[in-house]
Amino acid sequence: MGLMQRVAQKWQERSLIPVILLPLALLFALAANLRRLAYRLGVLTSSRVPVPVVVVGNITAGGSGKTPLVLYLVRELARRGWRPGIVSRGYGGSALDVQAVSVTSNAAFVGDEPLLLARRAACPVFVGRDRVAAAQALLSAHPECNVLIADDGLQHLRLARDVEIIVIDDRGIGNGWPLPAGPLRECPARIALAHALVVHGDASVLPEFHPQRTFSMQLTGERFHNLRDPMRTCNAEALRNKRLHAVAGIGHPDRFFRQLERMDLQVEGHAFPDHHAFQPPELVFPGADALLMTEKDAVKCQTFAPPETWVLPVEAQLNPDLAHWLVEKLNGCQTA
């Protein structure tokens, strides 16, 4: 287990390691607040693109369910007649300039989450450390797009946004301290400035937020797809009574392992750092009948994973209807 993984495990408590890191956390919080103030005062300016921008982000580090939510929004907007596109930083990828992401892109170059989005979303996906440049390039290449979803763009203030959606999961705000002493990218009061709050699972420690703009999200998945041969599918029953191992290189690996347990599967879980670049030996478990993994990990492992590697696609379910609320909001943006 790496140093950052050990530190992140302490983010739910105010123990010795977080206390030691508090001076760095205070500097991080000061820098974040000064940067936001600079935008508020006009010292730094945001750039607007000619279509509405919906930002999906969080105030905590680590996976909270943003990618499934982005897929949900793209699917539901398209179903309602919109033509969405997605911009992302491409975290974990080596690309320095703006890149269009295709289904055949290399995850090591464009990032694992953007590649997953490109394969699942059926809409244009562009990545770039400069989200404004990525948005402009996408709209230039795809002028038919009339709404952009900015994946993990809450803190990228240079891209002006029309709607902000914050996602938070069952870890809540952890110990309530900024990085690196805790999980917070911004102070909890930042949630109140968002247009909507999506609660993934049961997040019990949250700042007060408007109940009519709070939405509950659950991830559901029933059928596994074979990584080497996607035409092969099976349900959980076909995997029961097998010797199963599971790997997860995501922000919250235990969530994936718990989901498998709820499907009545007995697995030996192996957690890796978020965006981990898997190597072939890391997927070899002597005596295993099958290996289970997330879609995000699968896009990096297709060429070398064992033949009996199974992937569990998930879909986000929102209650109440977030897409209906968002369309009303976007229609207001168009007529404003």
Image (cartoon, rainbow, N blue to C red):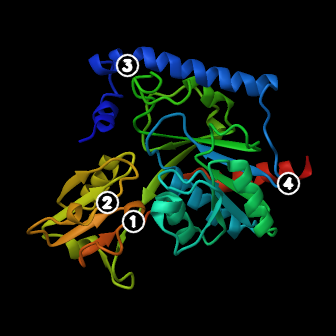
Dot 3 crowding, Cα within 10 Å, few <14, some 14–19, many 20+: some
Q: Residues within 10 Å of mark 4 (few under 14, many from 20)?
A: few
**Disc 4 versus disc 1: nearer the observer:** 1
Give the secondary structure at mark 1: loop
Between discs 2 and 3, the one toward the N terminus: 3
Q: Nearer the viewer, mark 4 or mark 2?
A: 2
140, above or below 30, in the image: below
Residue 66 x/y as whole percent: 53, 50
Q: Is residue 255 above or below residue 141?
A: above
User: What residue is shown at x 30% (from left), y 72% (from top)?
Assistant: 310
Q: Where is mark 1, residue-wise?
A: 300
* Image coordinates for residue 94, horizontal then vertical, percent: 50, 55
Amino acid at circle 4: Pro
Give the residue number, with chain letter if any, for mark 3: 21
When asked about the image quadrant of residue 16, the answer is top left
Q: Is there CB contact under 8 Å for labels 1 and 2?
A: yes
x and y percentages locating residue 184 in the rendered image: 49, 29
Depth check: 235 or 62 in front?
62
Give the residue at mark 2.
278
Question: Residue 213 placed where, x, y %?
Answer: 65, 39
In the image, what residue type sits under mark 2? Answer: Phe
Are there few (<14), some (14-19), or many (20+) residues within 10 Å of tag 2? Answer: some
Question: What amino acid is found at the position of numbered circle 1 in the picture?
Answer: Lys
**How far is the residue under mark 4 from the one under mark 1?**
34 Å
Q: Which residue is mark 4?
A: 50
